[in-house]
Image (tube, helix red, strand yellow):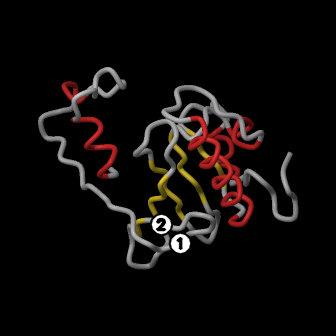
Amino acid sequence: MSRREYQDALGFRAQVSGYLPHRWPAWFQPTLVDMQPEAVGPFTHSFRLTQAGDVHVLPTPGHTPGHVSVLVNAPEANTLLAGDVSHTQALMLQQRVDGVSSDRAVSQDTLAKVRMLCQSQSAVYLPSHDPDSLDRLMQRTPAIPPGEVGP
């Protein structure tokens, strides 16, 4: 969990902002990550989860200031576990801010970076609320096929 997200979840306005830490299980002790100056595509900072460098946490603020996504690079497919960057892949490709956003300009910047990343990495894009995410994962369908610039 990003340190920023954790601090916001425990802060003074946590419940007003939609965080519900009182519902966390007693055993919940997340490992907090701080982004490092290691570029991954258009992201200037990331947090490397594996020594091999094939899994990175990326800062994707917008839904919340501390929101993160996880990029998994694998031979069979690069996959971006996008959480709440957008509700659907179509909305990300259209660069439309949707749902709850803490800052529309920040959300728009994140959408642009995510789209660039998906294009440069031929990544499968998996937002949390898209009913088609499972099909895209199973078929390893990139958000923007190689050679295309997207809609």
Image location of residue 136, percent across then percent down:
68, 45
Residue 118, percent from left and from top: 69, 57
Judge the density around disc 2: few (<14), some (14-19), many (≥20) Cα neighbours within 10 Å: some
Front position in the image: 108 or 22: 108
Local SS, label 2: loop
If you read the primary sequence from the N terminus, does the residue marked by circle 1 or circle 2 appear first?
1
Which residue: 48% across, 55% down? 70
Please give the residue where the numbered disc 2 appears in the rendered image. Answer: 45
Q: Amino acid at mark 1?
A: Ala
Percent coordinates x, y for residue 25 in the rendering: 18, 33
Circle 1 residues within 10 Å: few <14, some 14–19, many ≥20: few
| Residue farthest to the top, as pictured | 16
Q: Which residue is mark 1?
A: 39
In the displayed structure image, the side of residue 145 where residue 131 appears, left or right: left
Q: Classify residue 88 as left or right of residue 38.
A: right
In the visual, does 136 lie left or right of 52?
A: right
Q: Residue at x 56, y 41 (%)?
A: 85
Q: Which mark is residue 27?
A: none
